[in-house]
Amino acid sequence: MLQLEGRIQENMITRELSPGRKPCAHFVCSRNGFSLAELMVVLVIIAILMAISVPVIKNGQSQRELANSVAYMSTNLQWAMAEARKSGQTIYMGFKWRYDRNQIEAPLDYDVNSDSPLDGGPPDNPGIARVATGYYFVKEQPRTWAQPDPSQPATPGRPAAGTPYTYLDFLNEFNAGNAPREPIYPLDVAATNESMMPTQGSMVNATSTPKFFYPMDLDSSVAYANNFLGYAYQTGALSFPTDAALQDNKLFCTADLAEIQSYDVVDPDPTDGRVTYEPGLDHPKLIEQIVDYILLREVDFPESVYVYNPYKNKFVVSYSSGQGPGSEVYADFQSLQYLYAINPDGRIEVCQWAYGPEPFPDGSTDTLVHGHIERRPSAPLVYYYFFVTEEVVDAENGWRIQSNRRAQAQGSARLLTVWPLNGRYYTTDYAPNDVGKYVADDSPKLDIDDAESGFGRYTPVTAYRRNFLVPAP
């Protein structure tokens, strides 16, 4: 009996392991693969997981880019302050505008209780862009005489190294055939080379393409909307090198050869080949030191991050006394159109590039297009820089809000606040269009003094109480 059972088991094992047959656990064979229904269930589950996880991952990435952009700008401001202290020269920070006509807006003053402009005239400072894609730092560098080249013969009467180099020196070198360099400013070397124009030596400003420029024509006689230059330049419909009338739009461009030559009105002895300064007759700028503007650093934001101008110039942040019209305290939240002078003593001032020529002694201003940086007479107590991501607002398509939920959510945007007297800065999250926390203009809640932050009544919390992307409903 036992022998019979052994033979039966041996026979079963032999049949199980014989060639061409698959082993079956416990002598029971299961079917192969999955049914179509099972595969469909798995695919649906994967699709659901991806639909949930991809937006979360993307949102997390944009939030990291937002935080990194604010932190890096803060770090660069500190670097610029250290560089200004070390060099003893002023450094200017400016924003890189998006040259899209849809992003250019006139900085008209808006009444606090109305969304209609109070005036229809041109802006007091051109180039008001809604969106910035980056920023840059330019160093103000007064020109001095350089150390003479020992391999060259000595020049009689050459000033010692370090002596201020004036426009008078420029003209004398020009007359001597030395082709001095005109006042230097950041220029687009590639675009200038494509135009077959020189990048240094005489006539630089008349033939070079600016790296940074105002995208608006300064001519106030033309309607504001028709003055937009940026997109026309970007598409090739406008050429700075060949249009002398656009000299005024070149940022950090101080003077060209024609203007410098106009400073010398009277020359007592034209035959001696020397230019002299005749007080009361020649322009006083003739004996001023030439200032060059050198690009130190240029930073681009990630594609998903913008710095933007709010839709109004000013917002009420508190009341000076009582409530109602006449007692409002405003804060200017516009920032992109200005330059920021970082001084060696640590102060930061709001500036703008201007072309208000200083007159000749006889009062005329003919041929003058002298560019200069001027401090704005009324500057805000703090500077606000508003950061937002493309997940909140669509800067490519009419500045539409992408998601009301995100626009009204705390942490969907960041605010960098800088104190101009000492360069201190503060970063915080904020809701860029928080309808839920909207506070009426006459609310006593606006009369605040945020003792918690220690920064007084002009604090970042004011940003939570306004809708900066579009007017409140």
Image (tube, rainbow, N blue to C red):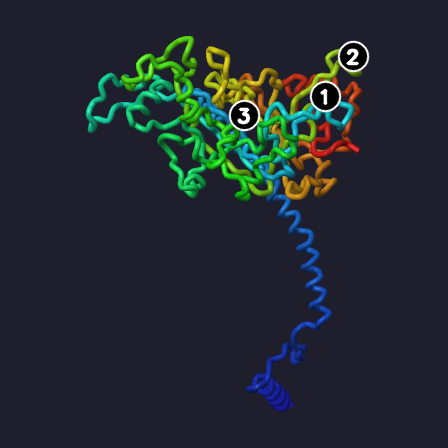
Q: Is 184 above or below relative to 349?
A: below
**Picture coordinates of residue 354, whole percent (x, y):** 53, 22
Say what secondary structure mark 3 lies in: strand
**Picture coordinates of residue 44, whole percent (x, y):** 71, 61
Mark 2 neighbour class, 10 Å CA radius: few under 14, some 14 to 19, many 20 or more: few
Mark 3 neighbour class, 10 Å CA radius: few under 14, some 14 to 19, many 20 or more: many
Q: Is 231 above or below relative to 172?
A: below
Say what secondary structure mark 2 lies in: loop
Q: Nearer the viewer, residue 380 or 439?
A: 380
* 95 relative position to 439: left or right: left
State whether residue 32 appears in this view: yes
* 401 relative position to 13: left or right: right
Between the residue at mark 2 and the residue at mark 1, the CA separation in whole angstroms equals 14 Å
Residue at label 1? 316
Q: Residue at x 40, y 41 (%)?
A: 196
Between the residue at mark 1 and the residue at mark 3, the CA separation in whole angstroms equals 24 Å
Say which amino acid is labelled 3. Leu
Residue at label 3? 339
- Image quarter of the N terminus: bottom right
Q: Residue at x 31, y 23 (%)?
A: 175
Q: Nearer the viewer, residue 446 or 366?
A: 366
Question: Residue 322, which numbered label?
Answer: 2
Q: Residue at x 62, y 23 (%)?
A: 124
Q: Residue at x 67, y 30 (%)?
A: 310
**Picture coordinates of residue 136, whole percent (x, y):** 50, 32
- Pointer 2 and pointer 3: residues touching (CB < 8 Å)? no
Say what secondary structure mark 1 lies in: strand
In which quarter of the view is residue 380 placed? top right
